[in-house]
Image (cartoon, helix red, strand yellow):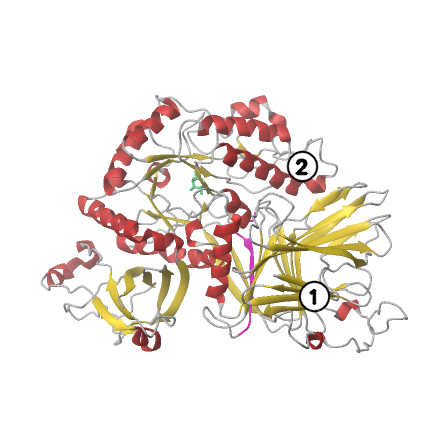
Amino acid sequence: MITERNGWFFLSTAHSSYIMRISSLGHMEHIHYGGYIPASAEGTFWIQGPDDLRLGDGTYYDEDHQHSFLGRMLCEYSTPGKGDTRESALIVEYGNGLITLDLLHQSHRIYPGKDYDILPRVSASDAETLEIVLRDAVLPVFATLRYTVYKEEDIILRSAEIRNECDEDIMLRTVSSVMLDLPDSEWDLISFDGAWARERYENRRALCPGVISVDSKLGFTSSEHNSLLFLARPDADDSHGEAIAVNQIYSGNHLERVEVSPFGFCRVLSSINPFGFGWKLGNGESFRSPEAILSYSSSGLDSLSYNLHRFAVKYIENSIYKDKIRPIAINNWEATYFDFNEKKLMDLAVKAESAGIELFVLDDGWYGRRSDDTRGLGDWVVNRKKLPGGLDGFVRGIHDLGMKAGIWVEPEMVSMDSALYETHPDWMVAIPGRKPSPGRHQYLLDLSRPEVVDYLFSAMSEVFSSGVDYVKWDANRNMSDYFTSSSAVKWQGEFFHRYILGLYSLLDRLTKAFPSILFEFCASGGNRFDLGALSFSPQGWTSDNTDAMSRIRIQHGTFRGYPLSSVSNHVTASPNHQSLRITGLEDRFGVACFGILGYELDLGKLSEEELGVIKEQIAFYKEHRKTLQYGAFRHLPSSDGAVFWMAESDDEMIVLEYQDRNMVNTGRHRRLRIPHADPASLYSVQRREKHVFKEDLGDLWESYSAVSHEPYSITVSGHVLCSAGVALPPLFMGRGFEPSTRILNDNGSDLYVIRKVR
Ligand code: GLA
């Protein structure tokens, strides 16, 4: 809900308020973002108090306003040159390199929904928008700030549009989607950083004076730094305390900055990365920043994530699958790599189907000359030596087994050894006169050129018309040799953003033309895990690293900003192909079942015993997948070196207990505690019966088998669960087996199903 009174704006969600006002000089002054304060509350003036400070060496606005220091004001959208020397939200170059701008309130309006449409498309059916138009004090340069308020989800969607009415061109150097000034800097900054195969590791540090920035210059969101950022009070944890989230709905270069000013204020900025960016605006032209979301919670990081998850599914995802149960996949990549033929694939599919798997995904290598990763990208025509019946024939074969059929594509790329490159060498991103640098032996197609997008639309339409039900959209290199030969581009500084706009238009056309296809994004694993990608495809390949121990960190960081239903995880072979780590089959499943489950290993190499175990895993997942895909994700208190995750729906809670290392002789029971359990209710707690393999126990197998092992199934009051927690059965301690002893190896996990019985 949005209220305006005497130049004050109150943006209220269920549990938060965003307040700003027009200052006496006409600047937009930020007042508050945090806990809920009704617009009717008395004394909001005293949140900031009067402007009565004098500063030693500060620049004040003019002689008539000697107390007006923009450098110590909480601003809404800052520009350089009038006393605010903190990081600017907007930098515009005009004249002979001038950058001073002074944005003053010109008009505003409040209206239901959202009356502009940009890609990625974010809906706003039951939301409300405030639009504030600012104009420079001298030049006809305008900034329109937009705030769309989603009450139930505690989300504010923000963006800025810059318009030039000057006769001369102006050059945009920095355009932020969000700027947020906070009155103190008692916050920790949490970012999600990494590299290939270790994406989105959570990093938390206290703020201190100066600027901290995280960004991507890779052309994609990147696995190096995600665009998601949390600020958390130093005492805030998963279930307590104040925290704020910011995330852009964008898949290109981004920059997040957090600055602590000399006066101890905190400024947060989320922008298109100014690196290599320059956007010329002629008279009458405008530029729209990507949209970004802000969310606030006073009850810890999990509840902040819950806001982001609900919002992503409801408003950002556009696929018809956004709230539907997702199929369990078998993917042939780590089962065969490039070495396959139709028989090999069908054998894998038959085995998968009999285990209960629902979708067969044919990964890289099915087209053109693609026999390894040095060739073939760009030639999206089936290789009949591998698939003599063509793609249609293959898809039919999979459908005849009663499975859905999926295909891998990497449309944005080209190999030099390809027919596409021979025909259109100029479509490749390369600077005339320079040899372009490859990544994984491949090059980027120039998606800022409409003819390239048109070609890809028709090439992909052809592939998707084979009857496939699922598409894995990959992109396996970052950008280099930044250059576009598009005639529409006025300045090479437009390259990065034009590419992303080209990608979005391609995805928009294809997802509209093939609405019944389930898309999954991928980019060298999780190099493009962002809300922009989620707008077109409701799930993403989280990481090429499927090792359970690594995935605990990767999925944890990903769940901070992205819903369970977007996080795709596969059970793969052991030793793991990325880490060489050995992890039990049941333990690999324990971690992979939190989100969208799949398998990616040669089922033909497994024993009947292992296949039987997979069958049971799949039956368990199907029974609980509504919770595992759409439940609310929470962290439970850790206990004795184990991590506890929960997915919670109206009907049940599924809990994962995971340990990196098996400690010997701890002498204690680990505890499972659910702080938010309802004290008035009675709960059943059941452990999923895991299969124990002889190889897990070696010489001890006989003594283990001599004991009859008890299932763990108890009934306890919510009082017990929330206040004390329950003792879990003892782990094997190196001293024989009791009926209750459980086996949890290194990287070991157990799953529990908890239901209210009264
Ligand atoms: C990338 C993906 C993998 C696989 C290969 C195929 O690395 O992340 O899952 O699809 O490409 O080349």
Residue at x 42%, y 47% (from the top left corner): 544
**Residue 512 visible, this angle:** yes
Secondary-structure class at tag 2: loop
In magenta segment, residue 297: no
Q: Position of residue 36 (x, y in %)?
A: 58, 70
**Residue 437 visible, this angle:** no
Q: Which of pointers 2 and 1 lies earlier in the amino acid sequence?
A: 1
Secondary-structure class at tag 1: strand
Location of mark 2 (residue): 483
Q: Position of residue 70 (x, y in %)?
A: 78, 67
Amino acid type for the residue under numbered disc 1: Met
Residue at x 80%, y 63% (from the top left corner): 26
Residue at x 29%, y 60% (from the top left corner): 751
- Depth check, mark 2 against mark 1: the one in front is 1
* Quarter of the image where the C terminus is located: bottom left
Q: Which residues are magenta?
A: 221-234
On the picture, is 44 further left or further right than 202?
A: right
On the picture, is 619 further left or further right than 242?
A: left
Location of mark 1 (residue): 20
In magenta segment, residue 227: yes
